[in-house]
Image: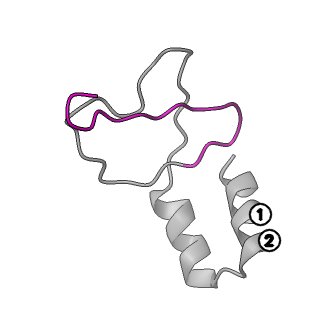
Amino acid sequence: MLTSLIKYLNAMCPLSEGLVADIWKYGQIKEYKKDEFILKGGAVANYTSYILKGAVRSYYIKEDE
């Protein structure tokens, strides 16, 4: 699946060989089930997520709304 991500990103903007190597070295594929959280409230992400298949919903609470 990292190959799919690299092809997708490379189609938008050519990636350097070093960047592709870093994606292979540090990239991880995680699968989430329906209704499972990628990031829970109050947590800070130390990574970037790309959705390869499916959909995701995001929301935040602003001033008690």
Judging from the image, what secondary structure is the residue with disc 1 in? helix
Rendering quarter of residue 54: top right
The residue labelled by disc 2 is: 11
Residue 15 drawn above or below residue 62? below
Residue 52 drawn above or below residue 4? above
For residue 16, the mark is: none
- Is 5 on the left-hand or right-hand side of 39? right
Mark 2 → mark 1, Cα distance in angstroms: 6 Å
Task: Rate crowding at label 1 as few (under 14), some (14 to 19) or many (20 or more) other CA atoms within 10 Å.
Answer: some
- Is 60 on the left-hand or right-hand side of 17? left
The residue labelled by disc 1 is: 7
Mark closer to the observer (2, 1): 2
Judging from the image, what secondary structure is the residue with disc 2 in? helix
Residue drawn at the location 55% of the way across and 41% of the way down: 29
Image location (x, y in percent) of residue 22: 50, 70
CB contact under 8 Å: marks 2 and 1: yes
Image location (x, y in percent) of residue 17: 63, 82
Residue drawn at the location 55% of the way across and 77% of the way down: 19
- Is 50 on the left-hand or right-hand side of 44? right
Residue drawn at the location 20% of the way across and 36% of the way down: 63
